């Protein structure tokens, strides 16, 4: 990581270079305390740190941050430029007919993930009932990568002594194993990426028995431009296809380059529409709002991804986590749990494994709901394959308020025959063409309504 800062009085400006992407930052220095922001999130500190004995120590999001004064070797490795391929659509791999469901290591463990942890998480996926609820992918995020051997084959590092054996173990539980890489020379956490080794890495992953690849732009931004995104992702999409193994292809490019318009052509099954989620109401709501303009691009085989779930990680209320789940289901978002499956509270289990809500997410029509705002209430309507609709009313305000759902606001023909509250599992009645209920602050009323 490299942080280049200029100080002008208490004002700071500069660039944060993770050995991955490069971000302009601005902020303040008050005494020895430094707070930095990125332009996209002026209300949320990107980094907070203190100058201690010449080192900058603090937190970047939930990660500890420790920077020593720059030395000559701290910058990115120099790599030879490899021109991206000509655009040539890669056929759909036939996967992800409904949004992928599973677990990913990043939100909870970041760089602390290892083989033993992944095995216990696979065990818990089964014993908790998560697998049977539909969560099948166990995804290892960044920091598994070791050095390349003399032939250039990527090897896992000491935390993952035998990736093939781990995949066999995960498969023996009726689960699938996912992994992570970058089209750049380095991943976001600074480990080797697949740059210049795309075909070779795809073959290695297939030989290990990998079922899912999250491919994170990161340091590709130091080699390529935004206009190259499609070609760069196509290279790995084609390489995965050439292996003959069904591997879900997850594009992680933070919503850059209108990804939905070309994602299916690189055989992408899901693509990020936002920056990284944090376990905070403002972050979760911010991500889902950013997902709104992408609705037209969601459909069977390819999904908009507002990032992984934070449900159960402890910094939102259960009402807020139910809203998180409701919104991800209404927008047909991939459901990748990011919590500790080994120690889930009953509330967390009931949120992640609410079968009626999961059915909304997994609906085969694959429509992404769009919101209509009315004061502090936001109503999201998702047409379903059986002709009914899922409707969610989110109370974004700070106090409880009454919401009314009018039948005339729903894309339904005929009169409402059945309406069901998917969180309380109780049928409710539409009287005179509408239904009203009080919604606590930050909670969501989620109904399935049908005329049959
Ligand atoms: C980026 C991604 C995250 C995670 C980290 C890993 O920030 O957006 O989801 O994969 O990299 O370094």
Image (cartoon, rainbow, N blue to C red):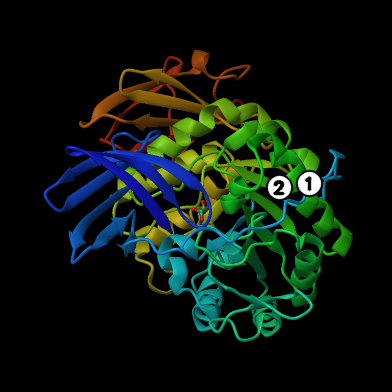
Distance in Å between CA atoms under marks 1 and 2: 24 Å
Looking at the rendered image, the quarter that the C terminus falls into is top right
Q: In this view, does 348 lie to the left or right of 44?
A: right
Residue at image x 72%, y 65%? Answer: 211
Q: Residue 35: horizontal and vertical position, in percent?
A: 24, 46
Q: What element carries label 1?
A: loop
Residue at image x 66%, y 43%? Answer: 224
Q: Nearer the viewer, residue 55 or 242?
A: 55
Q: Residue 408: horizontal and vertical position, in percent?
A: 51, 13
Residue 228 sits in quarter: top right
- 392, above or below 333, in the image: above
Q: Is residue 238 left or right of residue 166?
A: right
Query: Which callout, 1 or 2, points at the residue further toward the start of the chain?
Result: 1
Q: How crowded is mark 1: few (under 14 residues within 10 Å), some or many (20 or more)?
A: few
- The answer to whether one can see residue 294 in this image is yes
- 355, above or below 436, in the image: below
Q: Nearer the viewer, residue 65 or 67?
A: 67
Q: Residue 383: horizontal and vertical position, in percent?
A: 62, 29
Extreme front residue here?
72
Q: In this view, does 273 lie to the left or right of 10?
A: right
On residue 83, the disc is 1
Q: Is mark 2 on a helix, strand or loop?
A: loop
In the image, which is nearer the foreground, mark 1 or mark 2?
Answer: 1
Residue at image x 39%, y 37%? Answer: 285
**Marks 1 and 2: CB-CB under 8 Å?**
no
- 258, above or below 253, in the image: above
Looking at the rendered image, the quarter that the N terminus falls into is bottom left
Q: Nearer the viewer, residue 291 or 395?
A: 291
Q: Which residue has dot 2 on it?
A: 269
Q: Residues within 10 Å of mark 2 (few under 14, many from 20)?
A: many
Whether label 1 lies within 8 Å of ligand 1 gets the answer: no
């Amino acid at each position: 990581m490299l942080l280049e800062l200029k100080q002008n009085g208490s004002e700071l400006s500069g660039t944060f270079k993770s050995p991955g992407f490069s971000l302009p930052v601005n902020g303040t220095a008050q005494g020895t305390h430094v707070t930095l922001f990125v332009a996209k999130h002026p209300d949320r500190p990107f980094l907070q740190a203190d100058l201690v004995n010449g080192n900058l120590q603090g937190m970047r999001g939930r990660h500890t941050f420790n920077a020593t004064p720059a030395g000559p070797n701290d910058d990115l490795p120099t790599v030879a430029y490899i021109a991206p391929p000509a655009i040539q659509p890669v056929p759909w791999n036939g996967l992800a007919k409904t949004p992928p469901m599973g677990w990913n290591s990043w939100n909870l463990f970041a760089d602390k993930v290892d083989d033993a942890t992944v095995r216990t998480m696979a065990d818990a996926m089964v014993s908790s009932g998560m697998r049977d609820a539909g969560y099948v992918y166990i995804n290892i995020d960044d920091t598994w990568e070791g050095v390349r051997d003399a032939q250039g084959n990527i090897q896992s590092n000491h935390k993952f002594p035998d990736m093939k054996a781990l995949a066999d173990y995960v498969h023996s539980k009726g689960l699938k194993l996912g992994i992570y890489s970058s089209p750049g020379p380095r991943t976001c956490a600074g480990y080797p990426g697949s740059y210049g080794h795309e075909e070779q890495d795809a073959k290695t992953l297939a030989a290990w028995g990998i079922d899912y690849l999250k491919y994170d732009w990161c340091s590709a931004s130091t080699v390529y431009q935004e206009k190259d995104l499609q070609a760069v992702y196509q290279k790995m999409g084609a390489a995965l296809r050439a292996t003959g193994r069904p591997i879900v292809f997850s594009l992680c490019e933070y919503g850059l380059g209108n990804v939905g318009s070309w994602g299916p052509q690189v055989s992408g099954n899901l693509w990020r529409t936002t920056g990284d989620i944090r376990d905070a109401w403002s972050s979760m709501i911010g991500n889902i709002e950013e997902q709104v303009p992408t609705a037209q691009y969601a459909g069977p085989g390819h999904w908009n991804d507002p990032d992984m779930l934070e449900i159960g990680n402890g910094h939102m209320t259960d009402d807020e986590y139910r809203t998180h789940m409701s919104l991800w289901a209404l927008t047909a978002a991939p459901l990748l749990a990011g919590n500790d499956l080994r120690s889930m509270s009953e509330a967390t289990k009931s949120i992640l494994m609410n079968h009626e809500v999961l059915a909304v997410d997994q609906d085969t029509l694959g429509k992404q709901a769009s919101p209509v705002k009315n004061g502090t209430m936001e109503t999201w309507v998702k047409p379903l394959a059986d002709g009914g609709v899922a409707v969610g009313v989110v109370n974004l305000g700070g106090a409880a308020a009454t919401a009314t759902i009018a039948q005339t606001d729903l894309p339904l023909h005929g009169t409402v025959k059945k309406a069901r509250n998917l969180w309380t599992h109780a049928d409710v009645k539409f009287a005179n063409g509408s239904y009203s209920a009080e919604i606590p602050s930050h909670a969501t009323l989620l109904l399935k309504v049908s005329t049959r």
